[in-house]
Amino acid sequence: MNYDDLWKLDHEHVMQTYGRQPVAFVRGDGARLWDSEGKEYLDFLSGLATVSLGHAHPEVADAIADQARTLLHVSNLYLNDQQPKLAERLDLLLTSATGTAGQVFFANSGAESNECAIKLARRHGQANGGPERFHVVSAYNSFHGRTLTTLAATGQPQKQETFQPLPTGFRQVEFADIDALRAAMDERVCAVLLEPVQGEGGVQAAPPGYLEAVRALCDEREALLVLDEVQTGLGRTGKWFGFEHSGDVRPDIVTMAKALGNGMPIGACWARRDVAAAFKPGDHATTFGGQPLAARAALTVLDVMERENAPGRAEQRGKQLMQELAAIPEVVDVRGLGLLVAAELAEGIAAASVASACLGAGLVVNAVTPTSLRFAPPLLVTEAEIDRGVAILREVVRGVA
């Protein structure tokens, strides 16, 4: 079907909740995409940092096909032979990063992983501090999901207005302001929920010393530290987890999703063993979470990431990307970690216009704020592909400016 046919089908039968760009992608390979008209694109967005190893990675595709022919799904009322293996792998990664062993709950998305984290934090808080200890503090400009609960935790009032009243027990403070956080943490607070890098908030990384100070404050107030690594986790920032760029942080709960399945819907919530023990059978559940197909895909993704040293590659290519972006005259600032990068454009240049023009020129990026573009190419992106992508942007910006 051509684009016009697909557009008509979409507008007739799909709820119009997305401001879609005028393109329909039908095929991918590594960092490349092709649309319904046969045009080729360089993908520097990776499905919003999701297609971590690139499109149609052959090992992941083969694993999914093999598992689909073997066992697609069974209820979580029973064990399957993939979920425990994946839980062990993720626990080993986080034990190495935190020095503490934990346990994992599997979900289908980042929002669901954060929903699990919030429920677990409340269960733990009320069990250890009484019925009023259920409040969660997060940061302005954060993004934790679009369920009613994760939307209440998200520090973007413009996204919340339409859906009031939201669940109670959530409050926001300025990101990286430890004094504001301290003032907000009364005896009702069970947890602090933060992103090591605010991805949807404009690729804003926690400044040096901030997460360490939050950890110390949580210890002082007997609250849990929950880190949302949905966008930053599993190699994206140049380390396995974004919090590893800080010092002694040791989160109590960590959520993951995007990169874990290379496009297969899967999320995970890891918690220290004593915190995870707050959940009892029946407290939380999901039909599809941790099913054999998704777990097999994720195990293969981790195999490839470890073999290819995906965090190291992200660090190396991220430095190249940031250096080349900074050399564009119309780019006034570059920020980020690894291959999660934002380029701030000169005054008077609208990021949305540049992103749209880039799409027309065969480069997929997005306007993460009105004045900045976000770049999140696959972790296995090549040096030549970085050169090509930046060259496209350079020509586009020159024309828009």
Image: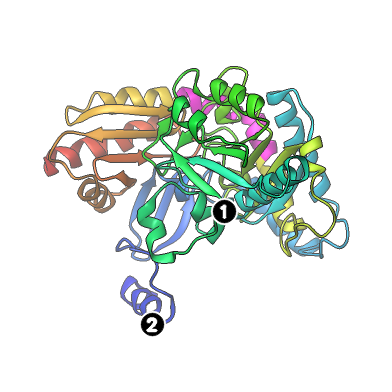
In space, the residues marked 2 and 1 are separated at their CA atoms by 28 Å
Magenta part mainly helix, strand or loop?
A: helix
Q: How crowded is mark 1: few (under 14 residues within 10 Å), some or many (20 or more)?
A: many
Residue 313 x %, y %: 52, 26
Residue 309 visible in image: yes
Depth order, front residue of 112/330? 112
Residue 400 x %, y %: 13, 44
| Camera-side mark, 2 or 1 | 1
Depth order, front residue of 166/250? 166
Which mark sits nearer the N-terminus, 2 or 1? Answer: 2
43 lies left or right of 324? right
**Quarter where residue 44 is shown:** top left
**What label sits on residue 111 in the rendered view?**
1
**SS for callout 2:** helix
Give the residue type that dot 1 points to: Ala
Residue furthest out toward the right: 78
**What label sits on residue 12 in the rendered view?**
2
Residue 314 painted magenta: yes
The segment highlighted magenta reads 302-316
Residue 30 visible in image: no
Give the residue type that dot 2 points to: Glu
**Quarter where residue 390 is shown:** top left
Residue drawn at the location 51% of the way across and 37% of the way down: 195
| Figure label count | 2
Depth order, front residue of 285/2? 285
